[in-house]
Amino acid sequence: MEGHEFWQVGGGGGGEAGLHRHDSANQRLIQKVTRLYRMAQFTVVALLLLVSGALALLITVGLGGRCHVSPDGETVSVSFQAKVSADSHSTDGNIQQGTGRFEASTDVQTPSAMLTVHRGNQTVGKYLQWETAHCGGGFHYSSGDLVVPRDGFYRVFLQITYQSNGEHCPVLEMKLNNKVFCFTASYPIDTILLTSYDTVRCSKELWTKSLYTSGLFKLEANARLRVTATYPKFIARNHYEVFFGAERLP
């Protein structure tokens, strides 16, 4: 009986010691997990701060270093910083004016026009009629006249193709002649800009003759460009064979 009681006492003491060791291990594990969790929180916060700083630096460099080209060809760096000294007011004003002129110039379409052969009546009085394929940058067409939008240097071009079309030739040898005229308010007389000549002998066989001419001219705003051609009845009817136009040089 006494031995039995001794065994019970001894067994209880070992259980308490084992339980104490188990609790200590749990506490150490909890402390370790807590430290790891805090380190993870610190790492996340540090990474967020690092990424935010990098983004702020990229935005500052990207916006602060943007450049515009001024009309005189110089590169102007536009700063988005709010710090402006009294001595820099005039400089900043010049930059803003230059940038405004640049943006306004890029918004304006380069003047250009392309007219093609008219499907109906070929002439208005003595001038050829046209159909508008393209008019941009201020060009417009009215009753045989292509009206120049503004002063500048323009390339003017004209192609007219003649061909036999069943019409009776008025003469055995036809002298083909095309002319581009310019009419202005400052000099209200038709002035020849371009002309082209060729001859063709009429025969029973089919024939085709193309005349092309172009040139560079300084034209004033509202100048009227118009075309005359001999033998309009023999002008081809395809838009790729008969066309007239102008484009402003940069």
Image: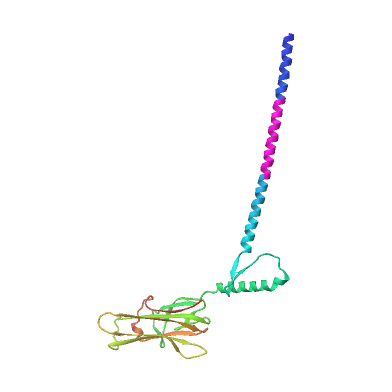
Q: What colour-coding does the image apply?
A: rainbow
Q: Which quarter of the rendering shows the N terminus?
A: top right
Whether the magenta-drawn stretch holds residue 22 is answered as: yes
220 up-or-down from 10: above or below: below
Residue displayed at 71% across by 72% down: 87
50 up-or-down from 36: above or below: below
Q: Residue 130: where, in percent of width, then height?
A: 42, 80
Q: Residue 95: where, in percent of width, then height?
A: 64, 72
Toward the top, the furthest residue is: 1
Q: Which residues are magenta?
A: 20-42
* Chief SS of the magenta region: helix
Whether the magenta-drawn stretch holds residue 149 is answered as: no
Picture quadrant where residue 196 is located: bottom left
Q: Nearer the viewer, residue 103 or 140?
A: 103
Left or right, 74 with reference to 4: left
Residue displayed at 67% across by 51% down: 49
Residue displayed at 44% across by 79% down: 245
Q: Residue 173: where, in percent of width, then height?
A: 29, 87
Q: Residue 152: where, in percent of width, then height?
A: 52, 81
Left or right, 30 with reference to 99: right
Left or right, 170 with reference to 89: left
Picture quadrant where residue 91 is located: bottom right
